[in-house]
Image: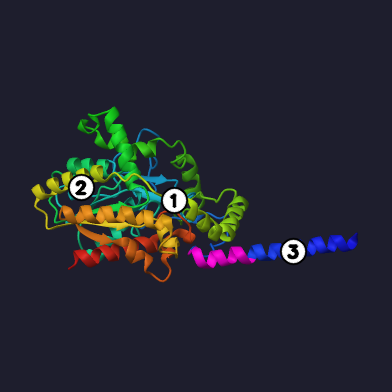
Amino acid sequence: MKKIYLINIAILTFFLILLVLFLGLLNKILSGVPIYDRLKIDRNQLTYIKSKDLEFKNKFIPKINELKINENIIVKCGYQESGIYHLVMEQDIYGFRDNKIEAYNNSDIVMIGDSFSYSVCVNQPYDLKSQLEILSKKKVLNLSQSGSGPILQLNTIKKYANNAKFDYFIWIFYEGNDLEELIDEIKILKENPNLYEKDQLFDSIGAKQILQSKNDIFVDYNKLIKLQQKFPEKKIIDYKWQNEKFVKIKIFLAEQLRGLNSLIKFFINYKQKIPNKEYDNVVKEMNIYLSNKKIKEKYIYYLPKYTRLANKYKKHPEVESLNQIKNLVEYTANKYGFRFIDGANFFHSREVPLDVFPHKVPTHFNENGYKLLAEHINTFISK
């Protein structure tokens, strides 16, 4: 009987070793996702804001649904992003991030996109706009909004850049969900055809509403003041990683199963209905608007998603699906006179593609990512 147990244990051990070797082989061959940072989490640690010249003022944090003009606000995004700090920003008179009022009349560059060009959870001067201004020595009006798609971006430009004089236009297309956002916006417009004729375009489906919809997005003002009194010499936010054990378990599983996950995706049908005509219409209308502005140059920057950068196998069906989107955007850009900038190739060809993400996990870009993005854009603008 003992011999049978030993044989069974030996067989089980053998198959476990084979499984580990198989998973390791899949990780090496199919998945470009590296071993994730273990996130040394200290629940008692307060993390510090990387933002220059920030001072705590009276009425520093506005209440929900009472956003005020030209006051710093703290957005509690760090839990889902870097794990290092939250976002400190100043809303301009229209609710956009960190724009000076004079930029609405006179700028060198107008830029628009979604949360990536908004620079979610990355503080000045490390955000995309600041980095681009530093490199190009040009004034940038950034009208990007988290959660926006091509239609909202088009109407935002037509409303808020209408009085602006500028030379360059940068439209950042994120391959992760911009076409999905486009489809959603078309559905919204069918239900409310006059949506963009309202005076408060930004309030309709823009970032301001997204901010206001989250009940926990602002740090409690009284709590913040107490912290500032306790640590008067430092600029701090009460920010702790939550459920760190669960986070580490998820990271461990992701490490071990990433290759298997890539293998399974070979059996998924990635054929999708790409809204070619709808996207063409939006770019066409943007081109007409910009032609009337008589600017020097207009660009569509194609920004890759994490999946593309993490994948070693170029003929993976998921990557081929993304290439269909890329081909559409490049074709449409060229059709209407936009210079197409291939950010997908730029970021994927780097030695360590995923170091542009915090801890190399799928979130928004980190400071390094926005620095590289600004440098890449500037190579075209500076020519």
Q: Quadrant of the C terminus?
A: bottom left
The residue sitting at 28% across, 36% down in the picture is: 186
Image coords of residue 25 (percent x, y): 57, 67
**Residue wearing tag 2:** 283
Q: Amino acid at mark 2?
A: Val
**Side of 5 where 317 appears, left or right:** left
Query: For the residues carrying marks 1 and 2, which lies nearer the camera in this image?
Result: 2
- Residue 270 x %, y %: 41, 50
Classify residue 208 by image quadrant.
Answer: top left
Q: Secondary structure at mark 1?
A: loop
Q: Mark 3 to mark 1: distance in Å?
A: 46 Å
Mark 1 vs mark 2, CA separation in Å: 34 Å
- Please state which amino acid type lies under the numbered disc 1: His
Q: Residue 30 lies in magenta, yes or no?
A: yes
Residue at (40% x, 64% y) in the render: 314
Tag 2's secondary structure? helix
- Where does label 1 land, which residue? 86
